[in-house]
Image: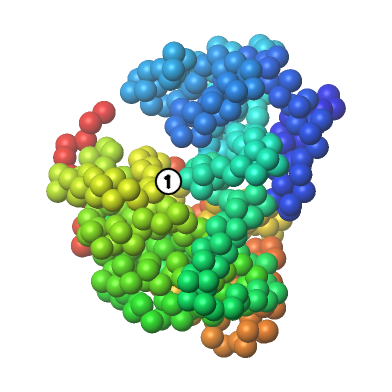
Amino acid sequence: MSTAQPINTVLGQMYAGLLDSRDPDPAALDAIIDTLRQREIIIYGAGRTGRMLKDLFGALGVTVAAFVDRNHARIGQIDGIAVERPGYLTAQNGRPEPMVVLGAGTMQLTELIEADILKLAPNLERANGVFLVYLLHYQSCKAKAEHGEYPPLKHCISYHVKPYKCPIFCRHVEEMAEAELAEHARAADLPPEPTPEGSTFNDVGYMLGEVCTLKCEHCHEGVPYLGSNERLPKETVLRDIRKLTSASRFIHRLDLVGGEPFSHPQITEIVQELVTVPKIGYIGVFTSGTSVPGDALCEALRHDRIIVTVSDYSHDNNLTDKQVDKIKRTVDQLKAHDVNFVVYPDRYWVDINGYEKGNVPQERLEEHFSNCFLAACHRIYDGTLYHCPYQAGGIKMGKFDKVDVVDIHDHTPAQLVAELNKFEHTKMIDACRYCNLPKGPTEVTAGRQLDRKHKVIRIHAETT
């Protein structure tokens, strides 16, 4: 690594290249690792990403001196490493040895952490943890893949919001899906289906409905504010997905989201049929755990290409005792049926749900869109493809015009290929002008509940 280039500049270039299917320069990455070994590493953020960085650093001989987190008193220490209060950084300011690695899972949370550090210790050198986590994981996975060993899918989705940009992940799920479908074809004595060329568009989340068992104040899908009780029938869901796959080379990631997917009356049949649709790889199912799945659904979910994510919002007295009990029962059911699942106890979100048009410069909007975690969450609902949940909710509520979307059934397969390619290479969308994120993200409590009048519910007395 050139001493003339800050570490984040080099990391950013490598990260951008990797998202564009260009492998990082091994010598440059080794130079960064050597630099980290020589510094006193402080990880700001003791959550999932911070702990992941600690493990990656440990495998590379990089010593972590301390964590910093606002919840330092609750966490205390991680594997013998002290978790300090943010003010700890002020005492390190001006020392040449420390380097602060920002342990956030998205660029938006990274911005928030960086703003904190600039107030406390503006002279401390900083390294972007989003970049480091992806680059170091990719280096490890690539070495294994060269010997025919793929990481578990659960590993792939744990560290990056865009696993579908990873060539190793994409190759793995293609091989899994194609081997399964080929086996079905042999069992039915059918010739293998040809794989036609199509768009490189390869990830989407299907919104099964606008009904949820929770009413989260800062819901990224905007569900509490839609005023809808609609759940799309199985036939509509499958028709949309088949149309999309007909124009795509391969859908490497398909998420099922809501509302609450587990409350959909046809969710079992939808899952059972989706795993038989050609050109679909990994299928993620997202639930709050507050709608307990039955045995039939759990059996359908027990599949090598399916991972259920349980978003647990029971922290900080957000939920009732009954809702917390349902989460526990959901987890018990998934375990009993050997379903592949993860539980993420999300504590913080960023507030996206403003709808006032801002004055953010075009360059900033484009830069933000290229790194926005929501831009990795394409959505489709009843035949309309949206770039992100915020855009989908805003258009449905009439907050801004229905532009920058694709109505997939308005096009022939050939036309849809061109529309999807255009969609995939969009530099920004009109909805970005209204979204809170480019204006400067604000951190909020994840899963805070509303009543029917959209007032925040206090389940129990708040604790300090």
Q: Residues within 10 Å of mark 1 (few under 14, many from 20)?
A: some
Q: Position of residue 368 (x, y in %)?
A: 63, 52
Left/right placement of residue 149 relative to residue 266 reads right
Colouring: rainbow
Q: Looking at the image, is 55 positioned above or below residue 20? A: above
Q: Looking at the image, is 311 positioned above or below residue 2? A: below
Q: Position of residue 334 (x, y in %)?
A: 29, 49
Q: Going 60% across and 75% down the picture, which residue do you hit?
A: 192
Mark 1 lies on a secondary structure that is: strand
Q: Looking at the image, is 318 positioned above or below residue 40? A: below
Report if residue 357 is visible in the image: no
Nearest the viewer among 463 and 45 is 45
Q: Going 67% across and 52% down the picture, which residue do you hit?
A: 167
Report if residue 351 is visible in the image: yes
Placement of the N terminus among the 4 image quadrants? top right
Placement of the C terminus among the 4 image quadrants? top left
- Under mark 1, the amino acid is Trp
Left/right placement of residue 241 relative to residue 359 reads left
Q: Going 17% across and 37% down the picture, which residue do you hit?
A: 461
Tell me the quarter of the picture where residue 36 sits: top right
Nearest the viewer among 459 and 406 is 406
Q: Position of residue 406 (x, y in %)?
A: 57, 78
Q: Looking at the image, is 40 positioned above or below residue 152? A: above
Q: How many marks?
A: 1
Tell me the quarter of the picture where residue 2 sits: top right
The residue wearing badge 1 is 349
Nearest the viewer among 54 and 271 is 271
Q: Going 58% across and 28% down the picture, which residue do you hit?
A: 56
Q: Position of residue 453 (x, y in %)?
A: 22, 62
